[in-house]
Amino acid sequence: MIVLVAAGNHAEAANAGKQQIGASSAAKNCITVGATVSARPNNGKKFAPWIAKPMDPSEVAVFSSRGPTKEGRIKPDVMAPGAAILSTASRALDSRSDRRVEYGICLDDDWMFMSGTSMSTPLVAGCVASLRQAVRSKGVQAPSAALIKALLINGTIDIEESADKGRSISSTPAAPNGLQGFGRVQISQSMAALSANPGCGFVDTGDNKVVPPLTPQDRWWKSGPIEILDSDSSLVATLAYSDREGQLLQNDLSLIIRNAYGEERHGNCSTGSQFDGQNNVEKIVWMGIGPGSAYLRIEAVGGFTRFNDPQGFAAVWAVM
């Protein structure tokens, strides 16, 4: 089962502080969805047809709750448009109700404009359903929730980079972070790992699967060679796993990529010497990795908290 949770709309709430993500949206194994504005003309919350130019969906909506969680985990996981979304209207809602025009005027009583992470989350749920169907078409009849989450995040776009603003907006730091998570969903890029193109692939491990889970005795898995043909190519890889219950990380797996020249990158870390010991999702975007054979390695660097406790995982990669 794949669980998606709206990040919440508390960024502007009184006494909200710098971090607002909590309760179910802070759960480590779910997909937490934040909101950007949409391309439809809006003022950040409300449909505004008098605004001449469309909005930029690479802007985080002002209401979208920010992370990280109090445990330090990266949340939200992903972003999608959630402002001025045309949604179905309840027939139980009076046609004269102020709620119908709270986020803009629609002339059709069967529809109304809405804004919030409860609008962005269904958009991502549709993407998740498409990814699951695509994986099943590859012969994997029971893909894990971790595999779908890894695919989704592997294709995300750093929203500041996609706007080509050169980090000019200081409030939108490089992904991953508590503002945009791993970035805005881009389903076409998420599908890339499922293609037959060179340098693309995935693995889904666990009980009753082709590749067994990691254990305290078998602490690592290594991919076959990932061939990088172009010196300008980038390798994007994501690790996700459903961690055991507990407020903090219970089983600490790490994503490692080594290129043909012996250089390493570690998931969610800016340098090759650090490891992320807080998150059960890790991503590497290695631009200009260099030609030759690269390898992806999943290793229990931080170890296991329980004796003889197997931990399945999913990893995906794609040369862009």
Image (spheres, rainbow, N blue to C red):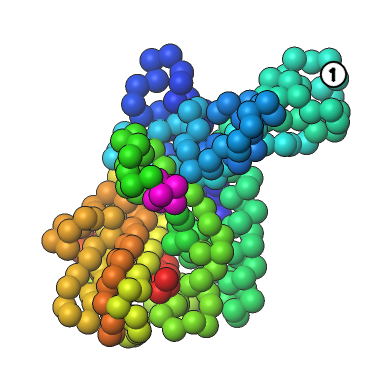
Q: Residue at x 74, y 20 (%)?
A: 101
Q: Which residues are magenta?
A: 158-164
Q: Quadrant of residue 49?
A: top right
On the rendered structure, is 7 left or right of 215?
A: right
From the viewer's perspective, tell me whether residue 98 is left or right of residue 173.
right
Write the residue at 61% across / 56% down.
127
Q: Residue 312, can we see it?
A: no
Q: Residues within 10 Å of mark 1 (few under 14, many from 20)?
A: few
**Front-most of residues 302 and 307:** 302
Location of mark 1 (residue)? 94
Position of 270 compared to 136: left or right?
A: left
Q: Is residue 210 magenta?
A: no
> Would you say residue 162 sits in the magenta stretch?
yes
Give the quarter of the figure containing the N terminus: bottom right
Residue 28: % across, % down = 40, 47
| Amino acid type, callout 1 | Asp
Q: Residue 228 is drawn in which quadrant?
A: bottom left
